[in-house]
Image: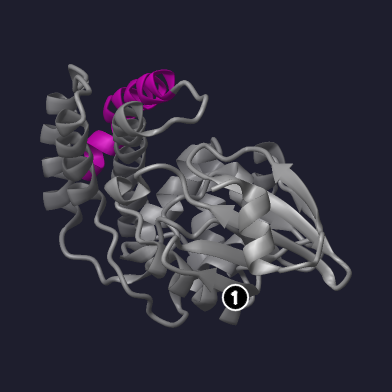
């Protein structure tokens, strides 16, 4: 369905101004401006359910994030397609360099704590099962599984044993730079389609590795989140850095067989396989594995 038809269905007769929002590599996002303000219309990409995305869960997670003041206000959820309408958050996207500043890390930790301590959401996110599911889906859709997958999977099994059971809390699970918006008061987080009950250390590691945090900056993030830095926290984050890149790598693999967007998913997968291999060679990671 054309975006004009979707907009007319949601706001019949309104004749709003519609602007494409760039940056998405899964969905199509639009800024819709009316007399009473601006909104974001999110139109899911092709076959995104095969990426483990449940639009009803995304909607519920978005509501939960809005309740704790981190996500944008949710305006509408259009079924059966699963289109999501939220209030447009004014502010600026925070670049990765700015995200690594001490004050930004403090504010991000505050936002993540609010989400993790917020109301539970339907759906689970288990990175160990996600990578396996992505491999199966990719193979079903004719995508060749990269040679590095088997070795990474064997390492992931060791990570899972070393990590052990973890309490499940509401998590975002996709903390890319583009998903942070500074509204002047709080750092807001958008794009909740991968949210689910999961391991908070996946969120923390996902943020750290996606935004290039150094060892000292990672310690500052942990200190801002927990109040101090304990060895077991450093070990958990080191382990889940590997799983963050493994998930991203396999996401890039499965998208090669699913997405019709103009994006280099093969290059994306290769980049993350290279990065997880570097992580696996680091002394801190080997120590965390035991």
Q: Relative to 42, is 160 on the left or the right? A: left
Q: Is residue 136 above or below residue 151?
A: below
Name the residue that disc number 1 marks: 66
Q: Relative to 47, is 27 on the left or the right? A: right
The front one of 7 and 158 is 7
Q: Relative to 11, is 128 on the left or the right? A: left
The quadrant holding residue 28 is top right
The quadrant holding residue 244 is top left
x and y, in percent, of residue 25 in the image = 52, 37
Coloured how?
A: one colour
Q: Residue at x 34, y 44 (%)?
A: 47
Q: Residue at x 73, y 63 (%)?
A: 39
Mark count: 1
Q: Secondary structure at mark 1?
A: helix
x and y, in percent, of residue 177 in the image = 60, 43
- Residue 290 shows in the view: no
Q: Relative to 262, is 49 on the left or the right? A: left
Q: Residue at x 68, y 61 (%)?
A: 8
Decide whether the magenta segment is chiefly helix, strand or loop.
Answer: helix
x and y, in percent, of residue 89 in the image = 74, 62
The quadrant holding residue 159 is top left
The front one of 11 and 274 is 11
Residue 289 painted magenta: yes
> Residue lying furthest right in this view?
35
Q: Which residues are magenta?
A: 265-290
The front one of 20 and 289 is 20
Residue 159 painted magenta: no
Q: Residues within 10 Å of mark 1 (few under 14, many from 20)?
A: some
Q: Is residue 85 above or below residue 237?
A: below
- Residue 40 shows in the view: yes
Q: Quadrant of the C terminus?
A: top left
């Amino acid at each position: 369905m054309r975006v004009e038809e979707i907009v007319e269905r949601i706001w019949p007769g309104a004749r709003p101004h519609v602007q494409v929002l760039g940056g998405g590599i899964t969905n199509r996002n639009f800024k819709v401006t009316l007399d009473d303000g601006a909104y974001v219309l999110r139109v899911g990409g092709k076959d995104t359910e095969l990426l483990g995305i449940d639009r009803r869960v995304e909607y519920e997670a978005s509501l939960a994030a809005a309740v704790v003041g981190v996500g944008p206000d949710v305006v509408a959820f259009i079924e059966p397609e699963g289109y999501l309408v939220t209030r447009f958050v004014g502010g600026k996207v925070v670049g990765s360099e700015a995200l690594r500043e001490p004050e930004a890390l403090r504010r991000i930790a505050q936002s993540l704590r609010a989400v993790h301590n917020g109301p539970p959401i339907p759906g689970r996110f288990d990175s160990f099962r996600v990578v396996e599911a992505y491999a199966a889906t990719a193979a079903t859709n004719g995508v060749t599984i990269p040679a590095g997958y088997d070795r990474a999977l064997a390492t992931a099994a060791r990570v899972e044993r070393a990590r052990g059971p973890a309490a499940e809390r509401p998590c975002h699970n996709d903390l890319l730079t583009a998903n942070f918006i500074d509204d002047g008061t709080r750092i807001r987080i958008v794009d909740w389609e991968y949210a689910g009950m999961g391991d908070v250390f996946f969120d923390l590691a996902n943020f750290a590795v996606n935004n290039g945090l150094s060892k000292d900056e990672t310690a500052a993030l942990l200190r801002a989140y927990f109040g101090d830095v304990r060895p077991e926290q450093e070990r958990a984050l080191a382990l889940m850095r590997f799983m963050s890149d493994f998930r991203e790598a396999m996401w890039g693999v499965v998208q090669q067989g699913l997405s019709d967007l103009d994006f280099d998913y093969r290059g994306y997968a290769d980049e993350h396989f290279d990065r997880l291999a570097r992580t696996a060679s680091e002394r801190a990671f080997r120590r965390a594995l035991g």
